[in-house]
Amino acid sequence: MTQTLEARSLAAVWHPCTQMKRHESAPPIAIERASGPWLYGTDGRRYLDGISSWWVNLFGHSHPHIRAALADQMERLDHVMLAGFTHAPVVELSERLSALTGLGHAFYGSDGASATEIALKMSAHYWRNQGRSGKNRFVGLAGGYHGETVGALAVTDIALFREAYAPLVRLSDTVPSPDARQALPGETAADVARRAAKGLEQWLQAHHNQTAALIVEPLVQCAAGMAMHDAEYLRLARLLCDHYEVHLVVDEIAVGFGRTGSLFAHQQAGIQPDFICLSKGLTGGTLPLSAVLTTDTVYAAFYDDDVARGFLHSHSYTGNPLACRAAVATLELFEQLDALTANRQLAQRVSTAFAPLSAHPRVRHARQQGMIWAWDIDSSLPDFSRRYHAAAMERGLLLRPIGHTLYCMPPYVLDDEAVAHLGRMALEALEATLLQESEPLTQEVTA
Ligand SMILES: *Cc1c(COP(=O)(O)O)cnc(C)c1O
């Protein structure tokens, strides 16, 4: 008896962020290969990857340069533990990340959530090593997302993700988001940022003695529904963190590596954070890897004859050579392709293709930052997200709205055909979804 891959998957695999019962009506789609921005299904159909496979892909799937680097690395060294050993890919990657950010002492994990945990632990341990162990709490922004492991959930302010686990989590406080959509009539995005910074100031005034760090997603709170803010917020947050002696952690896991137009989002504010968390695009979307970079000051506070003052944290695959080599190859592509410049031109072409969607009468807050586009859809469908996703997939386009926010975060390699497909099918899928408003409702989904 031959079963489809979809049926075998449902029997053997627990899919992420998914109510599995959902798959009774819409089974997962089996993909057999991918190339550039296209995913190819076992059903012979192709789908344009409009969300870069959960925001990880940068230069298209199976890029020949990354593929060649990985094949070469596999011939030399697959893996060696990083405690007590080192290797060329991890050294080269760390040197490059340091040169690009001005921070250093790269510490590696495998996923974004582990980068969050590393940064939070390092920050609190820094204060402890300074004799200020009372500074062990964290603060994040309303709607912030920093991963879903128990430590990362503490600073993730998305109710659906933490409701069931709240008893396990030492919840952090949240301060107002600088989300520019909150602008009152006559207010600019910078005004909203200043208003939110006032909220941060009041909070820090009261709690700085217990607070190790503020963690923010610079410029775009992606999981909140692509909530964008003015760089002014980051400048003010930096000043306030300095004043109140609180670390500033920038979570660039989603927005790093050119996504917002600059290599790193916080660079648009001209600030230097105390910690940077990286993952997702770090390996161009090929292998799991995350990194945390910090200042010489933080590093120095751990440097001691006493073992217990060291940063005692590890993962089995910390600094995996294959993943690091993929990351080096990805950084090489930024140079070879002059990707930030190329993206500015590409973003204009994509914005032009999206112009009819942005002008649609049901669209609110059409917005763009670098290679991220988002639109809030005024629809009575509680399950808009699921229906839109299905309508887009029928049209060969992978998009997954967050609630009523439709967004696109494509790979940086789109030819004219792909750009046209994106613009046309995103709009057609919207019209097809809105036509269903008169049909009976089904249950709501998020994520
Ligand atoms: C995706 C994401 C994370 C978590 O990364 P995982 O690899 O999924 O654990 C953390 N922070 C931000 C901003 C993210 O977008």
Image: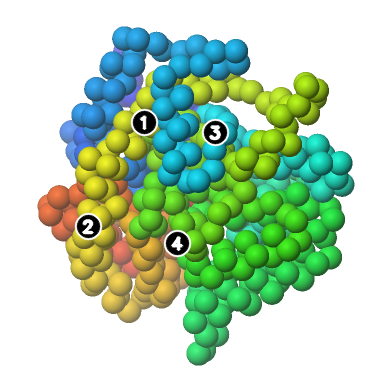
User: Label 2 belongs to which residue?
Assistant: 346
User: Which quadrant of the view contains residue 238?
Assistant: bottom right
Callout 4: 10 Å neighbours few (<14), some, many (20+)? some
Q: Residue at position x 76%, y 26% from top?
A: 304
In the rendered structure, are the residues bearing label 4 and label 1 in contact, judged by CB atoms less than 8 Å apart? Answer: no
Mark with earlier residue (4, 1)? 4
| Rendered view: 124 above or below 436 | above
Tell me which amino acid carries mark 4: Gln
**Dot 1: element:** helix
Query: Spatial distance from mark 4 to mark 1, Cα to Cα?
Result: 23 Å
Q: Residue at position x 54%, y 33% from top?
A: 106
In the rendered structure, are the residues bearing label 1 and label 3 in contact, judged by CB atoms less than 8 Å apart? Answer: no
| Rendered view: 311 above or below 298 | above
Q: Is residue 369 left or right of residue 206?
A: left
Callout 2: 10 Å neighbours few (<14), some, many (20+)? many
User: Label 1 belongs to which residue?
Assistant: 328
| Rendered view: 312 above or below 48 | above
